[in-house]
Every structure is written in structure tokens, then in C-alpha cells.
């Protein structure tokens, strides 16, 4: 197989020129489409653009299609894509592709979901993100992403001696971040390791505080050329590199449960395009539906050696001032669950110096990860990486 | 719930049919001998040489979780969802039954049993192997 090159992206010619994030919470009582509309208007205001400027639309919300009447948009194209938690990153990549091929100049990547009261699924049933099931494992009561991720956590504990306390260190560190960030689920609610250990067991080894909560909310990012972004009202954030990997490769080799995702090729492509190494990353925004996801991704991206992610987090390495401040808005675990847009929006805030009490001083390069799709066999199939940077 | 309720089509129907006869099949490439599950296409030889063939019904617990939350009233907790690596190589998601949930561990030898869940559905589950492991 030939290796992809991505020369256009490596030239750093694209940027996020607008960001809109609605209120994020549990049972907001607002329909998903209203959250999408709200996020879009916030992004337009952020960028100083009007609806007429948006000539491309990529929808990323589960279960919705291309009807744009609620948004008042008139783009040249509109489609909805779905790769679970990797969709946010994929939407940015697709937006770049549309711009490169002359289909659009400013693409709106639109997310808005209201899962906390139960979403209507294609099959007519209702449920939150945590109750999806796929394929034959459902016959054995394998339901929801928790069980799928627990299979990886169990392997990690077996191979490396990772403990429940290590998982708890992730929950505590991220809640600490969220506790000082208004608008997060964990705002003003720090937790201790004892709180984690005494929270009820859900799917062993995950306690309740190892799991994120479905959140209602909307996020819109506007992707455009760097030149165009520099003319907008908001501070541009450059897209320096992007990469993808797919867990089917690890399914064939039998390594799928020993790895979190197929991160190696995603990292190699993204870091290669950006021309960076792991030491150049100032802040990490990792997709974190469960605590184990942070530990295994820190290892896979090379912030610590394989198997040492638990002690690494427990040492304070992911806190502000640590080796790699991680999920500084609380992540999905304690911030809010906007699928892949949680990590993307936090990285954008960090590089725009809008991260408030958990701002990483002088943050110039941010890592964003997303993973998702078909959680009924192993954790997920798709992994996607973005490297973002300030415009110097 | 039947296999066809959660499958998109009948590609794996021979496997589930064989379970009714208490036979555990894998999908094997007769060109190289590599076994797959579920229905697959051989990475090296494509689909031409794939056949459903009987397997040993033995394997080892590769990973597992003990479920303590009620997701579906048909599955009262606690119960074990495990991935068994069959002796032929492929992974198979299943329940480990026939022992306390706390006895299940990575590396545990297990063997298939057949549970009739209704008149025409037989699900293979796994129990600790009687052989010395």
C-alpha cells in the first residue's frame, strides 16, 4: 500500500476561522436542531460572517439528514457524515477537501445533539449514546460503549498492572480542570479518589466516575483557507496536520483489544504533516468517553512508555503545569460530551487563549484525537488525529 | 432475540444453523488454513477458498467485563461478557457461565455449551473447561 502524503495540508494552508459552542448540559429540553441553529449563529458572530458566506455544509449529528431549513443556509453542497467520535475530525478533513477541490470557500461543520432525554433511532427505539448495540455481541447482553471499552481496560490491567486507582486518577485530574471552568458539568464540583472508588460499579472495571455522561449541546466550526481566516473577526487557528487509522487492521492481527485504536498511522501522518514530535505538543485534547481512553492514548501518542499511562497520570503529568496538560476543559468525562467536538473546541479555545482558568500559558500546538464507530465489537473502529497550531 | 435480529443479512446463517446441531463452525480459508469468525474474506486469498468448517469449541478468555448495571431486563446483572480467543484463532464474543462471575479471568480455558433460547435459536456460550489448564 502506498503511503498518503497530504501535501496541501502540510503547507498549513487551512484554518478554523470560527467557533460556536452553545450551552452544554443534561436535559436542556432543547431539540437538537435548535442547538445546531444556536451554535451556527454563535460561529457566524465569532467569525463576523453572514449566512450567505457559508457555501459548504457538513452535518455530523447522529440521525439527522440534510434538511437545512432550520439553519437558513444556502450552501452549494450539504451532506451528513457519521464516524462516531471521529466525525468531528473527519468533518474538518472533508471541509478541507471541499475547499481544495473548489466546491466551497467556507464550510460549516455542524454538530448538535440532545441525547440526554433519549434520541429516536433509525429503528424507532429511543436511547442515549450509552445504549447503542451492534451485531452478534448484543445476543450476549453487550450493550453500550462502556462494555466495549471495559474489554480494553481489562487487557491493560492484565498486561501492565494498571489499577482502578490509576483510572480514578484520570477522573480526578479532569474533574479538577472542569471544576474551575464555568459551563461544564463538573463546574465547582471537584472529586477525590475516594469519591471515584466509592461510586457504583457499572461495567467492571469501570465505576460510574470512569464514564462520561450524555450531554445536550451544539458546536459549529467554520473551516476555510488560512488567508481567508486572517480576514475574519476571530483569531485563526491553523490546521497543521491530520491523520487517520482504522482498527480493522488490529482486528486482523489480534491486537485490537491490546490497543486503544489504530493510533500509530494516524499519529505518523498528522505529526509528519505538521513537522512536529510529541515534545512539541503543548496541550492534548483526547477523546475520552472512559478513563482508560486517556491512559491508552497518552501511551500510544508517546507521551509516556507503553503500560505506564496509569502511573503517568497519577503523578500529575496531565494537570496544568504537568508534562502534558490534557483535557483541560474536563474532557467528556467532566466537561461535556459533544462527541468529537469536545476535544476540538477545547483545543481551539486553548490556542485562541480563551480557556479561562485552565489556559495553558503560551500554548502553540494542540493535539486533538477522536475515535468512534461501531462500539459493539471492540471500543471503536475509527481513529482520527488533528494537530492544530497558532498563526504566527 | 435471534441472530438475524442483529445481523444485516444471512451471511452467517450456516454458523447459527450448525449451533442447533451443537456444532461450532469457523469460516476457514482452505488455501492457507487461516480461520476467521464471523463471515470474512481471507486477507491473502479472497473469498474463493472460504468454507464453514467445524472447530474444537475450546478457547481461552482473552478479555471480559462483569456487568453490574441493568441495560436490558433480559440480562439481569451480574453477568460476564467475554471475548474468547478460539483455539483456531478468531475472537468470539460470548457469555462465560457455569462459575461465579468473580472466577472469570484472562487466560482461563473455556469450552462451548449450547443454550436453547427458544424453539429455533441456540446460542453458544462458554464454561470453564474440565480439562486441566
Image (cartoon, rainbow, N blue to C red):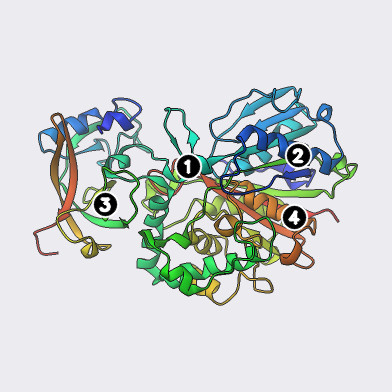
Q: Earlier in the sequence, mark 2 or mark 1?
A: 1
Q: Nearer the viewer, mark 2 or mark 3?
A: 2
Q: Which chain carries label 1?
A: A
Q: Which mark is residue A349?
A: 4
Q: Do the residues labelled 1 and 3 touch (CB within 8 Å)?
A: no
Q: Residue at x 66, y 43 (%)?
A: A5
Question: What's the CA distance linking mark 4 and mark 1?
Answer: 27 Å
Q: Is mark 4 on a helix, strand or loop?
A: helix
Marks 3 and 4: CB-CB under 8 Å? Answer: no
CB of mark 2 within 8 Å of CB of mark 1? no
Quadrant in which residue A346 is drawn: bottom right
Residue A218 locus on image (x, y percent): 66, 41
Q: Do labels 2 and 1 share a chain?
A: yes
Question: Are dots 2 and 3 on a single chain?
Answer: no
Left or right, B129 with respect to A354, comes to left
Graded by Cα atoms within 10 Å as few (under 14), some (14 to 19) or many (20 or more), the crowding at tag 1 reads some
Left/right of residue A84 with respect to residue B108 in the rendered view = right
| Residue of label 3 | B85
Image-based side of A318 in relation to A77, left or right: left
Above or below residue B91? Residue A60 is above
Tag 2 residue: A222
Residue A160 vs residue A353, the one in the foreground: A353
Q: SS at mark 1?
A: loop
Q: How far apart are marks 2 and 1 (CA)?
A: 27 Å
4 and 1 marks on the same chain: yes
Amino acid at each position: 500500500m502506498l503511503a498518503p502524503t497530504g501535501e496541501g495540508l502540510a503547507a498549513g494552508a487551512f484554518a478554523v476561522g470560527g467557533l460556536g459552542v452553545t450551552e452544554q448540559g443534561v436535559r436542556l429540553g432543547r431539540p437538537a436542531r435548535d442547538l445546531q441553529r444556536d451554535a451556527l449563529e454563535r460561529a457566524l458572530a465569532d467569525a463576523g460572517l453572514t449566512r450567505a458566506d457559508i457555501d459548504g455544509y457538513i452535518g455530523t449529528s447522529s440521525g439527522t439528514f440534510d434538511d437545512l431549513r432550520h439553519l437558513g443556509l444556502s450552501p452549494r453542497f450539504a451532506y451528513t457524515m457519521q464516524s462516531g467520535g471521529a466525525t468531528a475530525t473527519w468533518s474538518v478533513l472533508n471541509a478541507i477537501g471541499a475547499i481544495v477541490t473548489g466546491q466551497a470557500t467556507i464550510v460549516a461543520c455542524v454538530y448538535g445533539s440532545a441525547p440526554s432525554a433519549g434520541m429516536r433511532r433509525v429503528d424507532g427505539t429511543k436511547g442515549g449514546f450509552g445504549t447503542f448495540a451492534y451485531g452478534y455481541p448484543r445476543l450476549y447482553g453487550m450493550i453500550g460503549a462502556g462494555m466495549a471499552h471495559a474489554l480494553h481496560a481489562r487487557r491493560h490491567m492484565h498486561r501492565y498492572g494498571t489499577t482502578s486507582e490509576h483510572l480514578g486518577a484520570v477522573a480526578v485530574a479532569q474533574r479538577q480542570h472542569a471544576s474551575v471552568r464555568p459551563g461544564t458539568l463538573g463546574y465547582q464540583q471537584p472529586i477525590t479518589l475516594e469519591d471515584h472508588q466509592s461510586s457504583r460499579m457499572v461495567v467492571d472495571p469501570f465505576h460510574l466516575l470512569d464514564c462520561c455522561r450524555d450531554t445536550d449541546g451544539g458546536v459549529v466550526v467554520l473551516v476555510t483557507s488560512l488567508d481567508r481566516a486572517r480576514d475574519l473577526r476571530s483569531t485563526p487557528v491553523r490546521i497543521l496536520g491530520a491523520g487517520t487509522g482504522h482498527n480493522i487492521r488490529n482486528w486482523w492481527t489480534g491486537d485490537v483489544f491490546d490497543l486503544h485504536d489504530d493510533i500509530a498511522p494516524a499519529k505518523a501522518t498528522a505529526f509528519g504533516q505538521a513537522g512536529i514530535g510529541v515534545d512539541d505538543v503543548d496541550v492534548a485534547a483526547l477523546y475520552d468517553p472512559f478513563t482508560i481512553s486517556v491512559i491508552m492514548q497518552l501511551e500510544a501518542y508517546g507521551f509516556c512508555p507503553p503500560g505506564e499511562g496509569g502511573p503517568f497520570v497519577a503523578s500529575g503529568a496531565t494537570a496544568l503545569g504537568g508534562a502534558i496538560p490534557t483535557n483541560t476543559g474536563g474532557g467528556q468525562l467532566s466537561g461535556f460530551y459533544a462527541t468529537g467536538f469536545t476535544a476540538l473546541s477545547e483545543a481551539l479555545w486553548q490556542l485562541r487563549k480563551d480557556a479561562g482558568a485552565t489556559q495553558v500559558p503560551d500554548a502553540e500546538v494542540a493535539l486533538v484525537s477522536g475515535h468512534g464507530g461501531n462500539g459493539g465489537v471492540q471500543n471503536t473502529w475509527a481513529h482520527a488525529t488533528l494537530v492544530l497550531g497558532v498563526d504566527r | 432475540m435471534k441472530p438475524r435480529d442483529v445481523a444485516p443479512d444471512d451471511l452467517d446463517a450456516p454458523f447459527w444453523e450448525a449451533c442447533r446441531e451443537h456444532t461450532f463452525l469457523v469460516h476457514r480459508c482452505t488455501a492457507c488454513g487461516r480461520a476467521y469468525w464471523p463471515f470474512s474474506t481471507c486477507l491473502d486469498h479472497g473469498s474463493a477458498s472460504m468454507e464453514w468448517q467445524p472447530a474444537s469449541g475450546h478457547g481461552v478468555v482473552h478479555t471480559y467485563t462483569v456487568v453490574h448495571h441493568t441495560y436490558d431486563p433480559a440480562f439481569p446483572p451480574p453477568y460476564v461478557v467475554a471475548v474468547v480467543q478460539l483455539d483456531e484463532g478468531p475472537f468470539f464474543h460470548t457469555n462465560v457461565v457455569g462459575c461465579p462471575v468473580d472466577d472469570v479471568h484472562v487466560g482461563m480455558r473455556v469450552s462451548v455449551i449450547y443454550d436453547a433460547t427458544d424453539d429455533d435459536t441456540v446460542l453458544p456460550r462458554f464454561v470453564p473447561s474440565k480439562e486441566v489448564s
